[in-house]
């Protein structure tokens, strides 16, 4: 990650399959990340969200003890909060377990089924969550995103969470992003952001379309298994996907390699 210009890791999120891990596994995952990053420039944000708020609070407490840069949490998604006010209560219970660590709500309605107003959340949440730093905004609603960027006169950090439309978010004012493809395709996005900063929209669009092609290619056989297969191909074996996600067969991995070669993906790195 450091070699590819990525200086912060967001661990245990959606791509980290956190909802498929036991509490002990999540504790071990966080502990190991801080062991291997100690003394390096790589900072770590820990996702701690869980359907069990007691578990989420325990993970937040551990993250603070380990020295996390920040913690983040998804909404409970089986029993769902019915209002912004209840969502704030859920987040407050988690964030209060790590009061000295910045807290980010992780908004991803396509996976949680919780689709509440994030501008309303930011307008009122800090009264009950003093360490609220912002949102990981994984939601294609660019109107809401603009309102979030301007909430409380721009007081909150709102990293963008949909890799394949990063350029759209940059035009709205995004200054950072969190996403799964940055693990294996960071150079594409560095070039995209550099081109945007120079006003070279044609180059930025070309890099963004490369991102779209990569995501589309990985999604065909199953994104999680394909992403893990690609990481292994690049020399970082992160193991198999865990059910209900599925891993690629040998034939599928070989076919993926051929598709990525045909795209020119490995040259893009």
Image (tube, rainbow, N blue to C red):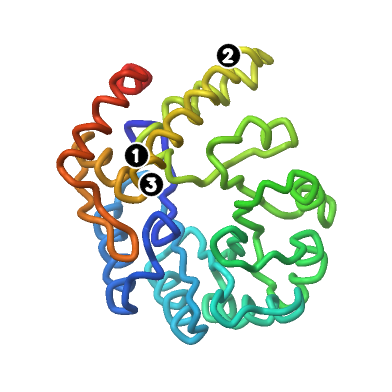
Q: Tell me the distance, in whole angstroms, between the alpha carbons under discs 2 and 3.
A: 26 Å
The residue under label 2 is 203
- Given the current orientation, which residue lies at the most extreme bottom position? 54
User: Around disc 2, counting alpha carbons within 10 Å, would you say few (fewer than 14), some (14 to 19), or many (20 or more)?
Assistant: some
Identify the element where label 1 is drawn. loop
Question: Which residue ends up furthest to the left in the rendered image?
Answer: 250
Q: What is the CA distance from the residue labelled 3 to the residue labelled 1?
A: 20 Å
Cα–Cα span, label 2 and label 1: 24 Å
Label 3 crowd (10 A; few <14 / some 14-19 / many >=20): some
Sequence-wise first label, 2 or 3: 2
Residue 83 screen position, x and y as percent: 75, 77
Asked whether, in this view, residue 102 is left or right of residue 56, the answer is right
Residue at (74%, 44%) from the top-left corner?
142
Which mark, by number, is residue 112? Answer: none
Rendered residue at 67%/79% (across/down): 81
Q: Nearer the viewer, mark 2 or mark 3?
A: 3
Q: Secondary structure at mark 2?
A: helix
Left or right, 56 with respect to 4, comes to right
Nearer the observer, disc 3 or disc 1?
A: 3
Counting from the top left corner in percent of width and height, residue 189 is at 50, 29
**Residue 127 place in picture, x, y as percent:** 77, 75
Name the quarter where the C terminus is drawn.
top left
Q: Which residue shows up at 43% across the image and 38% down it?
A: 182
Decide: marks 2, 1 in contact (CB < 8 A)? no
**Which of the numbered marks, if any, corresponds to residue 223?**
3
Residue closer to the observer: 29 or 8: 29
Check the image and report above or below for 210 versus 226: above
Q: Position of residue 183 (x, y in %)?
A: 37, 41
Which numbered tag is attached to residue 1? 1
């Amino acid at each position: 990650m450091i070699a590819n210009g990525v200086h912060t890791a967001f661990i245990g999120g959606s791509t980290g399959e956190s909802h498929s891990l036991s509490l002990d596994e999540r504790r071990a995952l966080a502990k190991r990340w801080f062991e291997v990053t100690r003394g390096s420039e790589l900072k770590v944000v820990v996702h701690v969200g869980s359907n069990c708020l007691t578990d989420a609070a325990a993970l937040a407490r551990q993250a603070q003890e380990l020295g996390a840069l920040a913690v983040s949490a998804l909404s409970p998604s089986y029993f769902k909060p019915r209002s912004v006010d209840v969502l704030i209560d859920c987040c407050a219970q988690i964030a209060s377990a790590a009061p000295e660590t910045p807290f980010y709500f992780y908004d991803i309605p396509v996976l949680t089924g919780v689709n509440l107003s994030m501008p309303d959340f930011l307008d009122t949440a800090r009264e009950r969550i003093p360490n609220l730093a912002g949102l990981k905004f994984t939601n294609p609603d660019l109107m809401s995103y603009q309102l979030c960027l301007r909430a409380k006169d721009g007081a909150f950090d709102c990293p963008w969470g949909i890799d394949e439309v990063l350029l759209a978010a940059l035009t709205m004012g995004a200054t950072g992003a969190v996403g799964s493809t940055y693990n294996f395709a960071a150079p594409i996005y560095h070039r995209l952001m550099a081109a945007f900063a120079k006003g070279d929209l044609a180059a930025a669009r070309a890099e963004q379309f490369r991102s779209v092609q990569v995501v589309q290619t990985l999604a065909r056989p199953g994104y999680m298994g394909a992403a893990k297969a690609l990481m292994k191909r690049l020399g970082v074996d992160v193991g198999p996907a865990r059910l209900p996600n599925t891993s690629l067969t040998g034939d599928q991995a070989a076919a993926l390699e051929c598709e990525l070669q045909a795209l020119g993906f490995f040259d893009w790195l």
